[in-house]
Image (spheres, rainbow, N blue to C red):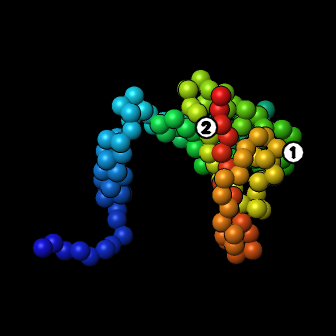
Amino acid sequence: MFDTTISFGNEEESTYIRNKLIEFNAKHVPEYLSSRYEEINLTLKDENGSIVGGMLSTLCWNWIEVEILWIDDNQRGKGYGAQLLNQIEQIAREKSCTFIKLNTFSFQAPLFYLRHGYVQVAVFEEAPIGSNHYYFKKTIV
C-alpha cells in the first residue's frame, strides 16, 4: 500500500509527470514523429524595437498548435495578425505538418480565423460565462 494523498505538485514533479506521459505517448506514434516537439515563437517589433505583437506556438508530431496570438490594441487592423498566421503556416509547410490548431474566445478573434481559412471544430458555450470558447483547425497541404 502507498500514500494516495493528492497535493499540488512542484515544478520538478510536474516535469516528471509530463515526461512520463511523453514517454508513454512515444510508444503509440510512429518513431519518426515521436521526438518532434519544438517551440516556435514569433515576435513582431516596431521601428523602435518595442514588441507590438507575437505568436507562441508548439510543433508537436505532425501539427502546430498556436497557443497565443497577440497584437497591441494600437496595431490591430493593420494586417499584422495575418502576417503572423501566414508565417506560421509557411513554417508548418516547411516542417511537413498536416494541420494547425488553435483556440480563441468570442471576445477575441473567431471571425479573424474564419476569414483566414480556419474551420471551427468545436465550441464550448458559456466559457467563460457570457462568452464562447472556439477551437479551430486549418489543414496544411
Q: Secondary structure at mark 1?
A: loop
Q: Which mark is residue 50?
A: none
In terms of image quadrants, where is residue 31?
top left
The structure residue drawn at horizontal position 31% and vertical position 47%, both measured from the top left corner, is: 24
Relative depth, front residue between 127 and 43 = 127
* Position in image of residue 47 (x %, y %): 78, 32
Q: Which mark is residue 99?
A: 2
Q: Which mark is residue 77?
A: 1
> Is residue 63 something one can see in this rendering?
yes
- Image quarter where the C terminus lies is top right
| Residue found farthest to the top | 94
The amino acid sitting under disc 2 is Phe
Vertical arrangement, residue 8 with respect to residue 59, above or below: below
Relative depth, front residue between 137 and 68 = 137
Using residue 29 as the reference point, say whether residue 113 is left or right of it.
right
| Residue found farthest to the left | 1
The amino acid sitting under disc 1 is Gly
**Dot 1 alpha-carbon crowd within 10 angstroms: few under 14, some 14 to 19, many 20 or more:** few
The structure residue drawn at horizontal position 64% and vertical position 48%, both measured from the top left corner, is: 102
The structure residue drawn at horizontal position 68% and vertical position 61%, both measured from the top left corner, is: 123
In terms of image quadrants, where is residue 13?
bottom left
